[in-house]
Image (tube, grey):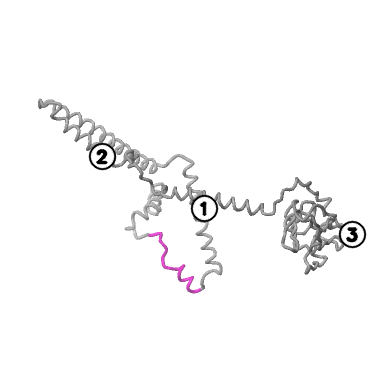
Amino acid sequence: MHGFVSLFWLIFSHDILLNFPVLGISLQPQGDYIELHQKRHGRRPDHDERKRKRAAREVHKRSEQARKVGSGWPSARALFCAGILLFMLWLVCVRFRCGAAARCQGQEVCQEALCREGTDEEDCSWLLEFTHDCLKMHDESTKRDKVEDVQEGALPPYLLDRDETKRAKVLSNTIKQKRKEKAGKWDVPLPKVRPVAEEEMFKVLRTGKRKTKQWKRMVTKATFVGPGFTRKPPKYERFIRPTGLRFTKAHVTHPELKCTFNLDIISVKKNPNGPMYTSLGVMTRGTIIEVCPAFSYSQGSP
């Protein structure tokens, strides 16, 4: 009975059936029943989506499998491949080492042969120099050296515009000097003016139903606005210049004639406290104003 079971297992074993198809028994599917079912009933509604997801998961599965395989002992196939690579690396190292050793040995053999023939060193010196030069040329073919014998006056391409750089520097200095002159156009020999604090210059106005907004400012110094000035709507007016503090005329004293003239103000050129006060037309001590006869004077006091 035991022998009959063993014979039955031997005949119907999976490996035996695959290795001995002569028995006429095969484990392969009989007929294309899957394709036939797809033709009759079609595919699942989400077939394409499932196929796409399966392909996307395949990469992660391979990665996880590679990590698991690499964490344990290497397989025999991996050890065999590593051994072959190490052997080839050893052969390459031996080949290069033998090449260098052969070159040195060749030089020694050449010198010994010349000395054995009885020739003088002076006669064979040219041959030794020739051999040395050939070896040096061979070494220099794969090596980069600095070129020391450079002709006088020769410059690399990136230094050919060095003179233009100097010229550009001079031009830059000239432009800076002109800017300084332009900036000091309205400078006058006045003593240092005390800067006016923002709290002294502006008064905070509270707005809103509950008077909680504090973004408006009212100018408390003398100001100048042009003849065609129109105030902005209250919603957009941040700086308020009161009508009682707007001036259109100024008393100007001529330094040579020692006379005072009541002239119309054209514009405010410069306020020493800053450009914001100049744009607002605020006139404080040291402000440069332009008057009607097209002369600019410094106003002593507002």
The residue that mark 1 highlights is: 60
| Segment colored magenta | 26-40
Q: Amino acid at mark 2?
A: His
Q: Residue 281, position in %: x, y?
A: 77, 59
Q: Residue 101, position in %: x, y?
A: 25, 32
Camera-nearest residue between 250 and 28: 250
The residue that mark 3 highlights is: 210
Camera-nearest residue between 144 and 91: 144
- The answer to whether marks 1 and 3 mark residues whose Cβ atoms lie closer than 8 Å is no
Q: Residue 198, position in %: x, y?
A: 80, 51
Residue at coordinates 75% horizontally, 58% vertically from top-left? 289
Q: Amino acid at mark 1?
A: His
Q: Amino acid at mark 3?
A: Arg
Left or right: 124, with 6 as reference point: left
Of the image marks 1 and 2, the number of the one nearer the N terminus: 1
Left or right: 189, with 164 as reference point: right
How far apart are the two marked residues, 3 and 2, measured between alpha carbons? 93 Å
How far apart are the two marked residues, 1 and 3, measured between alpha carbons? 64 Å
Of the image marks 1 and 3, the number of the one nearer the N terminus: 1
Asked whether 35 falls inside the magenta stretch, the response is: yes
